């Protein structure tokens, strides 16, 4: 039986998703897991890479449009002036029996639910507002009014029925939240609770 899951990791900008995903990837990427091998999907983004940012594949707007037209993305969306895509390679990985971890968006979750349904497991990274504001300021992507808008941005969402959901609090050390994420990704069904 194929127990592979698509772990859809979400959270507000500044919640620390990139750091947590890098932590988990370093510890379990390529290692055997109890339920299924775990692979980490890169996002394709129309944003240049930065030394301290997400390990993504940078594309120009024209490159992204071309790949989109050719059906190269399993999921794609637009947010904060950038386009984001997850490659169709994740479908091959899931079919081969590997669980896949992706950095997703709460605003576009419905597309993942429609495409992956019962294979989907949600992971929400939560952080206190003050900690989030400090992280957003320190990463230096925005300043002034743009930073204020990013801090104020909130996505209201309701977890879909029947989809496992795990919540990771990321207010303390990276190791605390990172170990919690590793446990979710390696425990089998990918959830601490169901909705």
Image (spheres, rainbow, N blue to C red):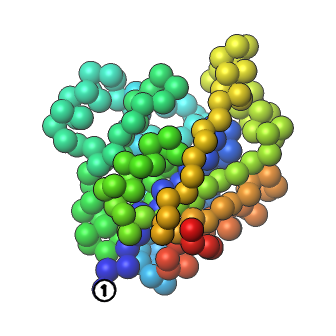
- Looking at the image, which residue is at 30% across and 86% down? 1
Give the image location of residue 176, x and y in percent. 76, 63
- Looking at the image, which residue is at 70% across and 51% down? 126
Quadrant for the C terminus in the image = bottom right
Give the image location of residue 2, x and y in percent. 32, 80
**Eyeballing the image, is 10 above or below 100?**
above
- Looking at the image, which residue is at 68% across and 44% down? 15
Give the image location of residue 117, x and y in percent. 36, 63
In front: 41, or 155? 155
Quick one: label 1, few (<14), some, or many (20+) residues within 10 Å? few
The residue positioned farthest toward the top in the image shown: 145
Q: How many marks?
A: 1
Q: Secondary structure at mark 1?
A: loop
Residue position marked by numbered label 1 in the rendering = 1
- Looking at the image, which residue is at 68% across and 68% down? 179
**Residue 134 can be seen, yes or no:** yes
Where on the picture, by quarter, is residue 24? bottom right
Q: Is residue 72 toward the left or the right of residue 180 in the image?
A: left
**Eyeballing the image, is 65 above or below 24?**
above
**Residue 18 can be seen, yes or no:** no
Q: Is residue 59 toward the left or the right of residue 139 in the image?
A: left
Give the image location of residue 76, x and y in percent. 35, 40
Where on the picture, by quarter, is residue 78? top left
In front: 20, or 148? 148
**Eyeballing the image, is 58 above or below 195?**
above
Q: Is residue 88 toward the left or the right of residue 187 in the image?
A: left
Q: Is residue 23 toward the left or the right of residue 78 in the image?
A: right
């Amino acid at each position: 039986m194929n127990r592979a899951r698509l772990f859809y990791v979400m959270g507000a900008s500044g919640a620390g998703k990139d750091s947590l995903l890098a932590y988990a990837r370093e510890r379990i990427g390529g290692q055997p897991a109890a339920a299924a091998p775990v692979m980490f999907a890169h996002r394709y983004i129309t944003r240049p890479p930065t030394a301290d940012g997400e390990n993504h594949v940078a594309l120009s707007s024209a490159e992204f449009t071309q790949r989109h037209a050719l059906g190269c993305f399993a999921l794609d969306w637009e947010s904060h002036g950038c386009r984001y895509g997850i490659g169709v390679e994740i479908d091959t990985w899931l079919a081969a029996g590997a669980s896949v971890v992706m950095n997703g968006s709460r605003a576009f979750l419905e597309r993942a639910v429609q495409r992956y349904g019962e294979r989907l497991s949600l992971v929400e990274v939560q952080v206190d507002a003050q900690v989030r504001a400090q992280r957003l300021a320190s990463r230096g992507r925005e300043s002034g009014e743009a930073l204020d808008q990013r801090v104020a941005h909130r996505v209201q969402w309701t977890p879909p029925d029947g989809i496992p959901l795990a919540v990771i609090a990321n207010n303390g050390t990276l190791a605390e939240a990172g170990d919690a994420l590793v446990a979710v990704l390696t425990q089998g069904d990918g959830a601490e609770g169901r909705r």
